[in-house]
Amino acid sequence: MAPPLPKAYEDDNIFAKILRGEIPCDKVYENDHALAFKDINPQAPTHVLVIPKGKYISFEDFSRNASDAEIAGFVRAAGEVARGAEGAVERGFRILANHGPEAHQEVHHFHLHIFAGRDTGPMISR
Ligand code: 5GP
């Protein structure tokens, strides 16, 4: 299982460092409220992470505390990424967010995974 979520946002998480430009990423898309980049350990031909630019630990934090503009910008960014993956709209893609230890959330900055380019299999392991 992944570690428990922190009580407060931690500025030293890896995605905070990417947002600050301290470590590189392979950028796919960016708008005022979100950044999308390729996962360093891709699980599908397309595996892109979409993160809000604001400091949100998890889906629960983001959905509770982000502004409407941040939420809209973030969802629009995810849509741009999905549309930008060749054939994904026609053939299919998966969007996934892990929240907390039982969902194996490893990075404590809210993110969506977008997978495309292959059959992504059953929805959840048994
Ligand atoms: P989680 O388990 O938190 O939902 O997913 C975290 C994801 O972040 C993993 O798929 C992992 O491969 C990815 N990741 C971890 N460190 C880095 C990094 O430094 N750069 C990029 N691009 N992805 C990372």
Image (tube, helix red, strand yellow):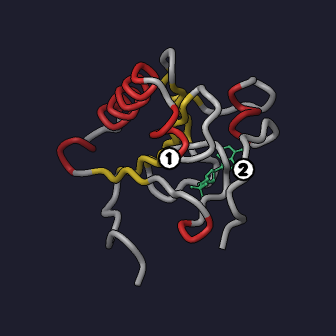
Tell me what residue is drawn at x 53 percent, y 57 percent.
99
Place of residue 119 in the rendered image (x, y in percent of width and height, measured from the top left): 30, 63
Q: Is residue 49 above or below residue 107?
A: above
Name the amino acid, label 2.
Lys
Q: Find the residue positioned furthest to the bottom.
A: 126
Task: Please identify the quadrant where the C terminus is shown.
Answer: bottom left
Q: Name the residue beneath numbered marker 2.
A: 7
Name the amino acid, label 1.
Phe
Pick the front one: 115 or 102: 102
Tell me the element at label 2: loop
**Image-based side of 110 in relation to 24, left or right:** left
Q: In terms of sequence position, does the residue under pointer 1 or pointer 2 come before the other? A: 2
Place of residue 76 in the rendered image (x, y in percent of width and height, measured from the top left): 35, 26
Pick the front one: 84 or 100: 100
Marks 1 and 2, how far apart in space? Answer: 14 Å
**Image-based side of 97 in relation to 120, left or right:** right
Q: Are marks 1 and 2 in contact (CB under 8 Å)?
A: no
Which of discs 1 and 2 lies nearer the camera? The answer is 2
Q: Name the residue beneath numbered marker 1.
A: 59
**Image-based side of 96 in relation to 7, left or right:** left
Place of residue 97 in the rendered image (x, y in percent of width and height, measured from the top left): 47, 53
Q: Residues within 10 Å of mark 2 (few under 14, many from 20)?
A: few
